[in-house]
Image: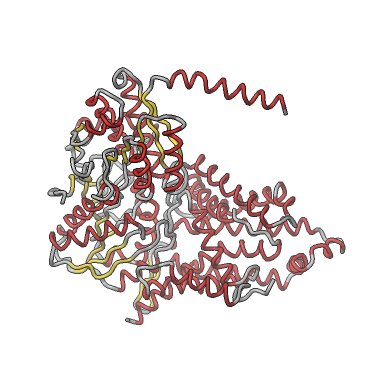
């Protein structure tokens, strides 16, 4: 096998990983801190994609249109997250997981139908922003500019998230809320605001990843459910609630998928699920997580 | 609580009485088809086509003096759900016929229910040969669509048109339809172009969001051409990822796709990002670039645009439309709505469609419908790719 081919495959895996990280980071964040398994995270991602398409139609199909549309989509989904948290999630904290699962699953169904009602069932597509059209040759393999851009965005978000969580006052509050919610409440901090804030950040990330994925994917009904399964696999591999765990979980997922299809071309998903099964048996809390 | 119950009951009575009175003498067609989820992309336009046919037939006086009525249900492209709905439609709604289902997961499952209940079932779009092969054929199942053998042969015919192609890589969704269509293509290729060879096959899952790894693996084999069975959103995603990776440049746009991506449905979504120059197909080209459009087709599309209130119609509505036309023709011929009589009438029957005549074969009750195929080109009149001079392919299919 030629080295340039292996390099292409490696970079392909990395591209997959960066998109997965963007979506899975928000999921992991909410679970890690609020102990809420948000099945509707994929629906926020889908809304981000549809809103980005809508934004592109409004703002102009070229030039800054895509970037403005992406920001618009992410902010809109963030606002929606705030509304959902304040109105509904609030009453679910501390309840059994089953209630949270049922509620978030209901959200999946409702938002799926809302999207279908507004945008129809037809597949939609957004063109790559003109600045990032084209590709460059690296070690004899073709690398699209857009994929390289994603490889910058992914680690940047991971780093920013880590800095905020570990090096800022807000981060200290968030970590405290994760460790002992009641104690933090008793100390006079406004835990409710911290939770809402985390949910908004998580929704914003879901909306942003949905928007950023549109230049390389079609927007279809059902993309919400497809992505949530993958995002969960990533979070399980990396460890629930660990940001770096999610990052490395994504990278492992991407690379295992990428090289797995070379070894088992007929079973493209086999390698990933096999990996998840092994990790669940050997280290149920994930590679970077802590035992619950 | 009491009041609410009363209100609910009153409402149920108020809405059901006129409905039941109206439905008493209509010919009822149970219609399970995906109306939600990713496959609703096809389910909805097929249902719309069928509804338009019903409206036209009823406006002209119905069939045997009775009106047709469609009872549509959302099957969610799920075989179990489709079976449950079909049973319910037969038992509770006492429908006269079953029409519908979309995928090759639902159709064979519903076919067994039709067989049990001795009720005629027409499938508009399932392509898997299993639906009507020797083990599964029974008097009540009819297929309006093409099948994967026909599709594979058409693909091989298209591929054989390329000069200087020796190595081919295939990519198809990993389920019954994809596996069958690639097997049929490889078999047909041996006959149509024995000098060409399939050197690698990729199997992404249906609905795969990320084709990068598959595309790289394909390019690693340095093929001269690609045969592709991806369709709908999967095709759009594949193209958007393959273009910047340089796949189309590497194969000089020598790709044949057998998954109906020549329709305005896909072309519109991709717009200028469509890989112009590939060979694609469609049951209905919708836009007839090149001039030789049959007048019946022109009228059909005009009607469809009005009926669905869209600028460009879908290439899938024709399947629902043809299905209802065939059923109405069968009922007329049988002069009865009894399934046994209609089944006898349908077997071997030839019926008119907006794209020419079709007949249900005696042996496997299917039309072997050819699909309109051609090179995808830019057309100054449209902001998306259209099939240039669409021609029915394959040209020489003989059922085995």
Quadrant where the image shows the N terminus of chain B: top right
* x, y percent for residue A147: 45, 67
Say above or below: B172 vs A90.
below
Q: Residue at x 43, y 22 (%)?
A: B23
**Quarter occupied by residue B12:** top right
* x, y percent for residue A118: 51, 40
Say above or below: A131 vs B86.
below
- The reply, left or right, for residue B223 in relation to residue B118 is left
Residue A130 appears in view: no
Work out whether residue B280 or residue B22 is closer to the camera in this orientation and state it.
B22
- The reply, left or right, for residue B199 in relation to residue B51 is left
How was this image coloured?
Answer: secondary structure
Work out whether residue B321 or residue A248 is closer to the camera in this orientation and state it.
B321
Say above or below: B200 vs B257.
below
Residue with the most extreme front position:
B116
Total marks shown come to: 0
Say above or below: B132 vs B197.
above
Residue B104 appears in view: yes
* x, y percent for residue B167: 21, 69
Q: Residue at x 23, y 50 (%)?
A: B134
**Quarter occupied by residue A199:** bottom right
* x, y percent for residue B109: 37, 47
Q: Residue at x 13, y 67 (%)?
A: B195
């Amino acid at each position: 096998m030629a080295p340039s081919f292996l390099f292409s495959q490696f970079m392909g895996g990395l591209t997959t990983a960066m998109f997965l990280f963007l979506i899975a980071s928000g999921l992991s964040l909410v679970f890690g801190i609020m102990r809420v398994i948000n099945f509707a995270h994929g629906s926020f991602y889908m809304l981000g994609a549809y809103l980005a398409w809508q934004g592109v139609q409004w703002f102009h199909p070229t030039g800054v249109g895509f970037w403005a549309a992406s920001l618009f989509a992410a902010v809109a989904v963030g606002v929606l997250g705030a509304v959902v948290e304040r109105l509904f999630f609030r009453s679910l904290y501390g309840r059994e997981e089953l209630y949270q699962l049922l509620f978030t699953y209901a959200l999946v169904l409702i938002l799926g139908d809302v999207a279908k009602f507004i945008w129809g069932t037809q597949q939609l597509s957004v063109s790559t922003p003109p600045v990032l059209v084209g590709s460059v040759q690296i070690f004899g393999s073709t690398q699209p500019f857009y994929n390289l851009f994603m490889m910058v965005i992914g680690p940047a978000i991971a780093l920013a998230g880590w800095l905020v969580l570990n090096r800022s006052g807000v981060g200290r509050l968030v970590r405290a809320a994760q460790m002992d919610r009641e104690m933090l409440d008793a100390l006079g901090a406004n835990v409710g605001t911290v939770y809402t804030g985390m949910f908004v950040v998580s929704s914003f990330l879901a909306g942003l990843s949905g928007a950023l994925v549109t230049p390389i994917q079609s927007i279809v009904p059902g993309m919400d459910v497809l992505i949530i399964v993958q995002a969960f696999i990533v979070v399980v591999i990396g460890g629930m609630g660990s940001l770096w765990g999610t990052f490395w979980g994504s990278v492992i997922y991407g690379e295992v998928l990428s090289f797995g299809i070379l070894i088992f071309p007929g079973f493209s998903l086999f390698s990933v699920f096999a990996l998840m099964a092994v990790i669940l048996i050997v280290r149920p809390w994930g590679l970077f997580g802590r035992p619950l | 609580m009491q009041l609410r119950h009363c209100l609910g009951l009153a409402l149920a009575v108020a809405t059901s009485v006129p409905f039941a009175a109206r439905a008493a003498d209509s010919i009822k067609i149970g219609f399970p088809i995906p109306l939600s989820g990713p496959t609703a992309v096809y389910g909805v336009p097929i249902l719309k086509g069928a509804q338009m046919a019903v409206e036209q037939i009823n406006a002209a006086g119905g069939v045997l003096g009775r009106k047709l009525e469609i009872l549509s249900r959302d099957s969610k492209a799920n075989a179990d759900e489709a079976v449950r709905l079909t049973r319910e439609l037969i038992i509770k709604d006492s429908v006269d016929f079953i029409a519908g289902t979309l995928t090759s997961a639902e159709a064979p499952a519903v076919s067994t229910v039709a067989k049990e209940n001795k009720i005629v079932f027409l499938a508009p779009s399932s392509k898997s040969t299993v639906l009507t092969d020797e083990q599964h054929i029974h008097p009540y199942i009819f297929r309006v669509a093409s099948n994967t053998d026909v599709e594979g042969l058409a693909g091989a015919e298209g591929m054989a048109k390329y000069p200087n192609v020796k190595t081919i890589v295939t990519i198809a969704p990993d389920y019954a339809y994809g596996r069958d269509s690639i097997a049929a293509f490889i078999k047909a290729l041996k006959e149509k172009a024995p000098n060409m060879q399939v050197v690698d096959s990729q199997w992404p899952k249906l609905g795969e969001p990320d084709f990068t790894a598959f595309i790289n693996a394909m390019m690693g084999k340095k093929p001269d051409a690609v045969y592709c069975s991806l369709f709908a959103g999967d095709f759009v995603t594949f193209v958007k990822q393959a273009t910047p990776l340089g796949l189309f440049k590497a194969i000089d746009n020598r790709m044949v796709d057998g998954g109906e991506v020549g329709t305005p449905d896909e072309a519109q979504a991709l717009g200028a990002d469509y890989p112009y120059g590939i060979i694609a197909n469609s049951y209905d080209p919708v836009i007839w670039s090149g001039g030789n459009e049959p007048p019946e087709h022109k009228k059909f599309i005009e009607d469809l645009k009005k009926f669905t209130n869209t600028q460009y119609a879908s290439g899938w509505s024709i399947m629902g439309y043809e299905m209802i036309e065939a059923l109405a023709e069968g009922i007329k011929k049988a002069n009865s709505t009894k399934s046994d009589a209609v089944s006898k009438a349908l077997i071997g029957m030839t019926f008119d469609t907006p794209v020419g005549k079709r007949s249900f074969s005696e042996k496997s009750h299917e039309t072997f419908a050819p699909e309109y195929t051609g090179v995808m080109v830019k057309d100054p009149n449209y902001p998306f790719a259209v099939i240039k001079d669409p021609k029915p392919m394959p040209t020489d299919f003989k059922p085995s």
